[in-house]
Amino acid sequence: MTYLSMQGITKYYPGVVANNAVTFEVEQGEIHALVGENGAGKSTLMKILYGLEQPDAGQIAFDGQQVSIPNPYAAIRMGIGMVHQHFQLIPSLTVGENIALGFETRKGLFVDQKTVNERVQALSQQYGLAVDPTQRVADLSVGIRQRVEILKMLYRDARLLILDEPSAVLTPQEVDTLFDVIQNLVQQGCTAIFITHKLREVMAICQRATILRRGEVVGTLKVAETTPTEIARMMVGSDVDTVQLTSESHPGPLQLQLENVSAEDDRRLPVLKGINLSIHGGEIVGLAGVEGNGQHELLEVLIGLRKLRAGTITIGDTNVTAFDGRKRREHGLALIPEDRNHEGLSNDLTIWENMAVTRYYRAPQSQGSVMRIGRLKDAARDLMKRFDVRATSHDTVVGTLSGGNAQKVVIARELADTPRALIAAQPTRGLDIGAARFVHEQLVDLRNQGVGILLISADLDELLAVCDRLVVLFEGRIVGSLRRQDATREQLGLLMAGRTTEQAGVVS
């Protein structure tokens, strides 16, 4: 039975047709994937369904009735809920307060928080979403925060859930838990639209998939009757092969070394405990681990944002432990940060300004204390060509770029001068197939040029595809090290859960 029908949906923006006569139908009780490259029109279509945007043409029918959805409040009242990729939670409030916000049960003028918490607790038990209604959101892991987002929709009696890139910030274990939750929701009467770039997830959990390309539907397929290769071909318009290391590494000189590195977290508790890690030129070392085991703090230690309690950091043959971030860069360190929007780019600045921020003060870009704007713009133009940044000009504001092109700006800036060592943190998070392939190609090319690369990723498929070695971080310690050809997802998962190398079956 057709539960949702969007017919002939068209949406124009200045100079862009985001959706062109899109027809999208979802059956009751199914998990329906909506896939396509960045900029294909997925988000616009779902914003229209959730009332965040209004279509220029087309009609929507939901649960047998023609509907108009002027705003998100109207969508929620109809039973349509959306779990956004970037969580819409207030960290200083409790779980219960976040879930009920705007829909509180009241006693007179006051919120009846006890009744709210009891209902949240009942919903969490009913749907297998264990949370503590009294806990502050700021103290929760990413995986638990996502449960809160889902519960927020269920609290509002949502029957159709739009899940926007729900696994983008989750570890493999959390993804498995999320899949169990979604399937449980469907068994209890919900219907789900699953927006994702990860075709393995489409194959694992969805019944049908609708593919968008350049604002138009190119097909709807039964997942059981197709393959990831066919879906990828429809998304991109041509065959797309994943990058896979085929050559053995030939490690060169030591480029980055951590010896007995220990550090504290923001609460002054030990978070890194005696880390020893060596990365040679010509190899990609992958760092795996469940989020919250010290990856973020290790990244901050490496780039000079967090002080060491003990240990040393060496780039090439220089001890840089006491150096700030700029001096470490000048000695050959480069960084692709884990959150490009908040840590890698200024969305209000242009492409050339973002590309200039790490070198504007150096010759030939500057002479004395005067920046040579012409040279900076020329350099940005050259980098845009070299790294295929698709934009009208170097004066384009970065905030208007797609996720893939924004990431290319970061990569172009960091690789403009070939570094000694590169730290790539979650470099393909939220990117589509084509953009992710581009990033992987850049990493492999750098590795072949003799750069030492540390790849921090929550995506085991990514680590197993492009890394020469993998190390696992658990509770601030490195608990295992494996060669790529000897590693399996199961072994890595056990190590990430705190098992010993013997328990995980790792051969030394």
Image (tube, rainbow, N blue to C red):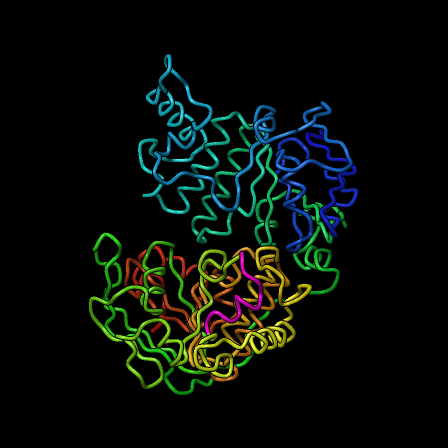
In the rendered image, residue 58, in percent from the top left (x then y), is placed at 77, 35
> Residue 240 is drawn in which quadrant?
bottom right
Q: Is residue 173 above or below residue 110?
A: below
User: In the visual, does 139 lie left or right of 17?
Assistant: left
* Residue at (59% x, 76% y) in the render: 374
**In the image, which residues are magenta?**
348-358
Image vertical order of residue 374 relative to residue 461, above or below: below
Position of 236 with respect to 109 (left or right) is right
Seen at 60% across and 75% down, the residue is 383
Determine if the magenta segment contains residue 94: no
Residue 320 spot, x, y in % from top left: 30, 78
Report the residue at 72% width, 37% height from top.
55
Choose top left, top right, bottom left or bottom right for residue 253.
bottom left
Say which of 78 and 173 sits in front: 78
**Placement of 28 over or under 43, stated as above or below:** above
Q: Quadrant of the C terminus?
A: bottom left
Residue 431 at x, y percent in the picture: 57, 58
- Magenta stretch containing residue 356, yes or no? yes
Instruction: Indicate left or right for 135 with 463 as reference.
Output: left
Quarter of the picture containing the N terminus is top right
